[in-house]
Amino acid sequence: MAYLDHAASTRIRPVAVDAWAAASMQEGNPSSTHSAGRWGRRAVEDARESIAAHLGIPPDSICFVSGGTEADNMGITGIVAGRRAVDSRRDVVITSPIEHKAVLDPARALESSGITVETIRVDSRGVIELEHLRELLQIYRGRVAVVAVMWANNEVGTIQPIDEVVAMCRPARIPVHSDAVQAVGAASLDLNLPNTSALSAHKLGGPKGVGIFVNHNRYPIDPVLRGGGQENKMRAGTLNVPGIVGMAAAFDETFADIPAAIAKYRGLRDQIIEGARAIVPDVVINGDPENGLPSLAHLSFPGCEGDSLMLLLDAAGVQVSVGSACNAGATTASHVLSAMGADPMTARSSLRISVGWSTTGDDVDLFLKVLPEAVTRARQAGMSTPVEGRV
Amino acid sequence: MKVLAAVSGGVDSAVALARAVAAGHDVTAVHFALQPNPELVRNGARGCCTISDAHDARRAADRVGVPFYVWDVAGDFQKDVMADFVSEYEQGRTPNPCIRCNQHIKFAAVLDRAVALGFDLVVTGHYARISQDPDGPLLSRAIDPRKDQSYVLAVLGRENLSRCWFPVGDTTKPEIRAEAAGLGLNVAGKPDSHDICFIPDGDTAGFLERRLGARPGDIVDVDSGEVLGHHSGSYGFTIGQRKGLALSRPSADGSPRYVVGIDPQTRTITVGGREHLAVATITAQQPTWCRPVPAPGASLHVQVRAHGTPVPGRLAEVGEESFRVELAEPLFGLAPGQSCVLYDSDVVLGQGTVTHTG
């Protein structure tokens, strides 16, 4: 078996399992003041400090949440509401068309309450056009509530120029939110740049269901979850102590040697790309391998339905992701590839292959061993007719 | 064998899947996404295209422990089934979209793709039986006459049938439900689907009107030529239709009147008494044969509707492009576009699309 879908979720690290399991055995709520509560509170604060040290950010900028999606919702819905409460003219959200749905959906939902959502054009590699952002900031001067640009794209891996986005927004005191879920652990990044960011534990070997909303200097937000006032009233709900300490253990191991991890990922990724190119000379490399996540390859195999490839690879023990989202119903071309100007057929014939901390050369070898037959068969099976306008 | 099981989210295909697994095959389950916009089809609609149907299909695959995938064939479905459905009605014919779907999607596009991907057989939850004899595959009626679907499978022909298996055809529906319950499949009590899946509200006339627009015309008496009423589109009528004509006057003798003719060119609907609907001979085109082509003169049974009564007849002529049958007793209200399926006792011989009746 070769699991090559680490961008979806990577295997939990044994140290995280141990930390999670030990904390799960402890009774008590970290909000309680008795000894059991104090144990939990201390475990949470130790985790906060150690994670902050790894990320090079102040501990009080870390707000523990349930994952990347919640943190992105806070970065959009929470920030917009917080800003509007003090300045009702702030009615514009600027984002990119290649964001994760955890950013795009909350932004679109705000449109019904009178918010305008603008998206920054991206080029064919999936990089935002900074000149377009500059234009949008001009057009909506005095009205922008937040600019949200992801650090690295989850489908094609393109890394965005966050430093330049921040440099453009800071003089106008416009907050920047960045979804850094895919970037943490796979790229060097300075989380002090954006005002807020979203992180998820399970992408780097922590437990599922826990993540971080980074919020520098407690930028005022309207909480998405209200209740017991935990996390400085930013995020209510009993703290997920096992998840948080498990995440901290995963951070410890991830950040022990980031350059070595990046070098390993890049080596495996390049083997995948070169191997695929040798087998399928007309393979299309999507995204920006020069300035993209080292852990991810997004490839289109002309004439192959991505679904067919995935079925064949899965049956051969190789797990990858199709480059388009088929959600019970009809397959829709990925919004990311569409925004990058890819034609629908290229989008439908694509696979995302991503490596992680547990990937070995054997995984890549197995993928390259079974790829030729999968491509041959998928080509014979052909492509379905794309959906045209309604009959 | 490597088997691809098509799972709709209903009980029949779930049990067919389970039986394929129990038989020891290497099974992969596939659900077809037929609707370009599944979110628009309300959940609970008795079709096979809603998101809850896809969920039910996935759960059935989970229960029996096989891989599950959704195949998007919405583009083909739109082109070969929905567009064909609209165009056939537009031309005054009465198509059967389930047959078109079987012909072009479920057993053509899918079989070709399945074979290319390395599968040997496609399994579905259709009620029909299939076996082999020296002349090849033998498609025959299901044990449960109320559920028999051999009529809509006749279009498959010998080559497709040689790669199909219908594991539930030898069992009655109540037994299939009991088996599903015993296997812990949550679709055991799910209602049967009856509607055309892409018209879940059953309003075919409304569906066609939204696509074809109003095309008003006259309703004319077949004998007198008198205009008895008006309509907003000839595509809303089917030969043999009695209800919904809204005629201004009853017939002279008070007997009911039926649609006996549709002329989409002049937009004229002709109505008349039941005697005008009697059909003694049927000419059908584009035949597909499930058995060796029968010789002219062969006695057989003819069925023209999915759950119609077969009537005895005789094959009068048979050629590459068409066949003609003479019926021993008349059929009433047969519309061009319907499928004329020929049976030898319970065995399906073949079928063609009705073009002329006499």
Image: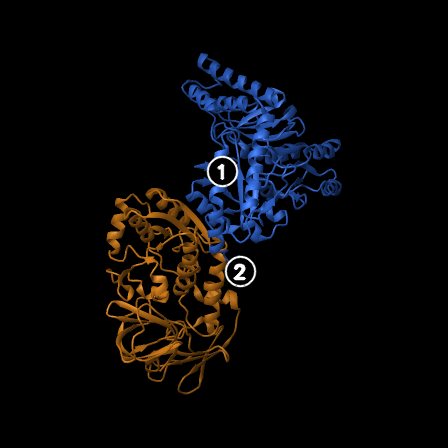
Chain colours: A blue, B orange
Rendered location of residue B150, percent (x, y): 31, 64
The answer to whether residue B12 of the structure is visible from this angle is yes
Chain hosting mark 2: A
Secondary structure of the residue carrying tag 2 is loop
**Residue identified by numbered label 2:** A390
Marks 1 and 2 in Cβ contact (< 8 Å): no
* Residue A209 to residue A311: above or below: above
Report whether mark 1 lies on the same chain as mark 2: yes
Cα–Cα gap, marks 1 and 2: 44 Å
Q: Residue at x 64, y 33 (%)?
A: A177
Rendered location of residue B284, percent (x, y): 37, 76
* Residue A279 to residue B234: above or below: above
Q: Residue at x 42, y 77 (%)?
A: B247
Of residue B135 and residue B139, the one placed in the foreground of this image is B135
For the view shown, which residue lies furthest in the top direction?
A35
**Residue identified by numbered label 1:** A365
For marks 1 and 2 on the same chain, the one whose residue lies earlier in the sequence: 1
Residue A131 placement, left or right of B49: right
Q: Residue at x 40, y 46 (%)?
A: B68
* Residue B326 to residue B73: above or below: below
Quarter where residue A102 is shown: top right
Which quadrant would the N terminus of chain A be assigned to in this image?
top left
Residue A343 placement, left or right of A366: right
Quarter where residue B96 is shown: bottom left
Disc on res. A305? none
| Three-letter code for the amino acid on which mark 1 is drawn | Asp
| Three-letter code for the amino acid on which mark 2 is drawn | Arg
Q: Residue at x 45, y 74 (%)?
A: B92
Rendered location of residue B27, percent (x, y): 35, 48
Rendered location of residue B120, percent (x, y): 36, 54
